[in-house]
């Protein structure tokens, strides 16, 4: 069986198992087995892991019973919800294989990224809750999957580890007020290119909150060494995210996270998105210019001259327009949208473009 078929087979088996557990309307049964016991190698540690899992399940069930008769619009329920999430997060992090403080870091940084986007307060609360509970499903994993570097695991064990996201979803089944957060938890391991887990969602089909959580939580994993087996400095961990933009991660979110780590203000972060969108338009125009030039005969000129922005007029034949080393467009006829975009980019970048036009053409 090739790797792609193996991945799909593992994904399908896991999903079938999780769906059958979820349909029972209760928390998933413990996934301990003979090989799990072997993986622990220490009965005392195994007992400790199982006690924490049982404690988590009991706390969730107690919360369900305490709130099942409350009106969702009742303000008391909102206070109970956040208290429940915070306490549950603390219980999760008493697990020997889960590091203290990580979920709080993920939630805080995810909210800073989310603040840039035009989303509702409820969606931001979902991201907060999902960040604090992002490791919930790990309480059912054996020690070897929590302590070994991810890269060193077998393909089967990698997907068993990634299944913690679905396990977390099952544990919170029935708590309707956390439905949004549960969805984000489920999809935290999806990849931007569609090769992630559990559903193979692609690009913006992956919920925004899940795309954000993926970036922040993997950054932590690279920092501490749980991804590669070797702890990294911040720049090296960030470079791993950058390398995997558009494959594992939403490129826009990676860019925003870079600025979050550098302490950018909300206004600066929003400016970053605006510039990124303009640059995306510029890049597309650049590519189209190259394609058009390749399809047609090479442009022949007698003279190419550099002009100021104020001299750029409709109908001019452009050789190229740059902002420093960043290309905007080439080999095209100037229309009003080009003039408008170059003017806007000039204001945003705070520097004048380098504009070269054909003085005459044959």
Image (cartoon, helix red, strand yellow):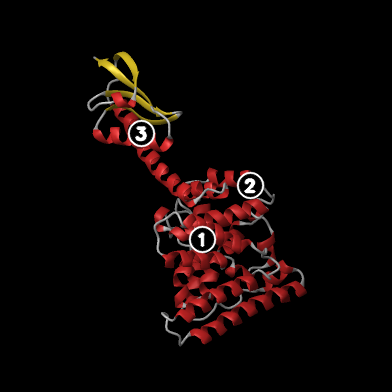
Q: Residues within 10 Å of mark 1 (few under 14, many from 20)?
A: many
Asked if residue 69 lies left or right of residue 262, the reply is left
How far apart, in angstroms, are the residues tagged by discs 3 and 1? 33 Å
Is residue 215 visible in the rendered image? The answer is yes
Q: Residues within 10 Å of mark 2 (few under 14, many from 20)?
A: some
Q: Are marks 2 and 1 in contact (CB under 8 Å)?
A: no
Residue 26 position in % (x across, y down): 51, 81
Q: Helix, strand, or loop for circle 2?
A: helix
Residue drawn at 32 percent across, 36 percent down: 341
Residue 234 tag number: 2
Asked if residue 282 lies left or right of residue 83, the reply is left
Residue drawn at 75 percent across, 72 percent down: 45
Instruction: Reply above or below: 140 against 159.
Output: below
Seen from the viewer's position, the closer of residues 306 and 297 is 306
Instruction: Reply above or below: 91 against 11.
Output: below
Q: Residues within 10 Å of mark 3 (few under 14, many from 20)?
A: some
Give residue 272's quadrant in the image.
top left
Residue 125 tag number: none
Residue 43 position in % (x across, y down): 76, 74
Q: Which residue is mark 3?
A: 287
Residue 188 tag number: 1
Q: Helix, strand, or loop for circle 1?
A: loop
Is residue 196 visible in the rendered image? The answer is no
| Mark positioned earlier in the residue sequence (2 or 1) | 1
Seen from the viewer's position, the closer of residues 357 and 225 is 357
| Mark positioned earlier in the residue sequence (3 or 1) | 1
Q: Viewer-nearest of labels 2 and 3? A: 2
Q: Helix, strand, or loop for circle 3?
A: helix
């Amino acid at each position: 069986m090739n790797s792609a078929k193996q991945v799909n087979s593992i994904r399908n088996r896991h999903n079938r198992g999780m769906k059958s557990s979820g349909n029972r309307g209760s928390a998933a049964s413990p996934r301990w087995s003979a090989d799990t016991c072997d993986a622990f190698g220490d009965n005392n540690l195994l007992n400790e892991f199982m006690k924490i899992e049982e404690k988590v399940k009991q706390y969730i069930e107690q919360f369900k019973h305490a709130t099942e008769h409350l009106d969702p619009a009742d303000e008391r329920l909102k206070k109970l919800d956040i208290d429940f999430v915070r306490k549950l997060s603390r219980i999760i992090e008493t697990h020997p294989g889960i590091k203290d403080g990580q979920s709080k870091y993920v939630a805080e940084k995810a909210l800073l990224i989310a603040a840039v986007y035009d989303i509702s307060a409820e969606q931001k609360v979902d991201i907060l809750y999902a960040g604090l509970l992002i490791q919930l499903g790990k309480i059912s994993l054996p020690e070897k999957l929590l302590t070994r570097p991810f890269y060193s695991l077998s393909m089967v064990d990698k997907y068993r580890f990634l299944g913690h996201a679905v396990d977390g979803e099952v544990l919170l089944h029935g708590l309707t007020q956390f439905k949004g957060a549960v969805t984000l938890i489920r999809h935290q391991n999806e990849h931007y290119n569609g090769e992630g887990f559990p559903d193979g969602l692609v690009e913006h089909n992956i919920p925004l909150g899940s795309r954000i959580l993926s970036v922040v939580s993997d950054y932590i994993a690279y920092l501490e060494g749980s991804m590669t087996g070797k702890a990294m400095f911040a720049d090296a961990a960030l470079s791993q995210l950058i390398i995997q933009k558009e494959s594992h991660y939403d490129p826009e979110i990676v860019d925003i996270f870079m600025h979050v780590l550098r302490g950018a203000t909300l206004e600066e972060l929003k400016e970053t998105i605006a510039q990124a969108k303009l640059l995306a338009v510029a890049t597309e125009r650049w590519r189209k210019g190259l394609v058009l030039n390749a399809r047609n005969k090479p442009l022949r000129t007698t003279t190419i001259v550099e002009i100021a922005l104020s001299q750029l007029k409709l109908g001019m034949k452009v050789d190229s327009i740059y902002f420093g080393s960043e290309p905007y467009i080439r080999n095209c006829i100037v229309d009003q949208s080009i003039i408008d975009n170059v003017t806007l980019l000039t204001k945003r970048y705070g520097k004048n473009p380098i504009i070269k036009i054909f003085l005459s053409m044959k």
